[in-house]
Image (tube, rainbow, N blue to C red):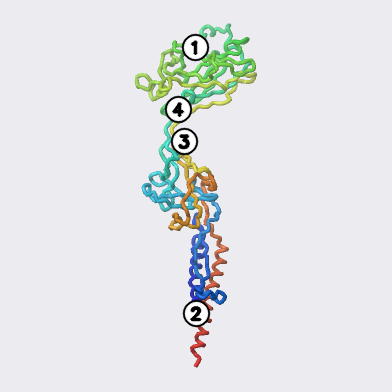
Amino acid sequence: MAFQQGLSGLNVYSKALDVVSNNIANASTVGFKCAQAHFADVYAGALNGAAATQIGIGVNLVAVQQQFNQGNITVTSNSLDMAINGNGFFRFQKSPLDQTPYYSRNGQFHLDQNGYIVNSNGCFLTGFDSPDGVSVNTASIVPLTVGTAAIPPKQTGWTTAVDAAKGGLAIGVNLDSRSTKAVSVTDPAWTALTPFAWDNTFNVNMFNYSTSATIYDQAGAAHTLTNYYVRQGDSGVAARTWDVYTVIDNKYCVEDGAGNPQANTLVFNTNGTLASVNGSGTTRVPLDLSQTILNTGAAANLMDNSPAAAPPNMSWFEDLASIGGAFFLDMGSTTQFGMPNNVDHIRQDGYIAGTMTNLTVSEEGYVVASYSNGQTKMMGQVLLTEFANPHGLQSAGDNLWIETFSSGQPTIGEPGGGTRGIIQSGAVEDSNTDLTQELVNMIIMQRNYQANAQTIRTQDQILQTLVNLR
């Protein structure tokens, strides 16, 4: 009598129960992929070709194959947690120097003491870094880091490209076409205040309208820039012509190079749209801050922060000298319609220093830091890896897999590209273990084990009967 079939069944279904038990044990493991036991029958070779008389000699466990179907996604309170919605794996290194790749679907991440994005086992998440904080460097794949240092201030009107066509302050206002000239020629103050004067006798009747904006110097200190709009006349071209005077911090008036307040002249079309600024089609005008007039009439240099030349505790706009010593003011959105004076928009490119307040990850894997000054900075891009045969990956423990010859070589790219999934920030992918199904499978494997044990008992009883023959 043969016990081979029953013994093979006991062995196989014992292992199958191990598979089910492992699935159940990892029902709450983030990114875990459940496995299935695959069986095959076993036959002895038939040398005489008598296949019709072959009797199988049992069962064999040919594979334990993990199932990579999508798990449920659960929202978390950690913005660095990431769930892959679709195909792909996160790519890891176990140290910044060890470039051996590992792969996982577990997206529970945090920052280590050096700013690296790591998982709970200290493995380093890899991707493209962003040296300039604006775009990513696709030349190499590196462990992703997040700089936690404060973002430095940026002065208004300054760009890293030193491009005079960018940066500065843009103010869009509507100047009421129904306004009259700033002061009547019969006003006693008119002769004393003609033209626009900036001294201790400054008079509100010198202008029709004013608006202020906050600008920032090279140290991130805030300053107030005020534009004063003065209509030249009540009829003809003069009624469509306005002079704009600029004052900083209610103390310094931008001068014209001859010690007088600088007037930037706006001329409007009859329909109220802007025709020209200072007689040209350029709407961005430079303001020379190297010489300004104090309200006492004295001269000051807002671009010199030396102790002898600058007011105390002011660094001012020193770096603007690199782009011609000018602060740029854009008035291209100014209109003269028959409606009340109004500010439509104020835009400027400066800001104070700021500390990091939050990290987010986009669907495409871009890691972006937000700062207390309202600015954002790109830290890098998370990449996803795909395999032609993910079932061929070898488990390495700790929710990690390694590639094998069977899995094929990995293809790496940004989330959402090709057939790769997207990333959901502040969420994780749950284990795809179906507890109900696994409990049913456990019952089935238990019954199969019991049935195979029964075949051995039956074979034993038959053998005992033969032994007892006399």
Look at the image and tell me whether residue 392 can be seen: yes
Amino acid at the residue labelled 2: Ala
Instruction: Tell whether 151 sits left or right of 345.
Output: left
Q: Secondary structure at mark 1?
A: loop
The kind of residue on which mark 4 rests is Thr
Sequence-wise first label, 4 or 3: 3
Between tags 1 and 2, which lies in front?
Answer: 2
Q: How would you rate the neighbour count of disc 3 (Cα within 10 Å): few for under 14, some for 14-19, many for 20 or more? A: few
Q: Residues within 10 Å of mark 4 (few under 14, many from 20)?
A: some
- Name the residue beneath numbered marker 3: 134
Q: Does the rendering let one see residue 371?
A: no
Q: Residue at x 47, y 28 (%)?
A: 350
Quick one: label 4 or label 1, which is nearer the N terminus? 4
Q: Does the CB distance between marks 4 and 3 fall below 8 Å? A: no
Checking the image for residue 197, the label placed there is: 1
Closer to the camera: disc 4 or disc 1? Answer: 4
Which disc number belongs to residue 2? 2
**Dot 4: element:** loop
Residue 446 lies, in percent from the top left, at 53, 71
Q: Position of residue 213 (x, y in %)?
A: 51, 24
Closest to the observer, 405 or 159 = 405
Task: Report the residue marked by disc 4.
Answer: 159
Frontmost of labels 1 and 3 is 3
How would you rate the neighbour count of disc 1 (Cα within 10 Å): few for under 14, some for 14-19, many for 20 or more? Answer: some
- Report the amino acid beneath label 1: Ala
Q: Hey, which residue is sitting farthest front in the picture?
A: 48
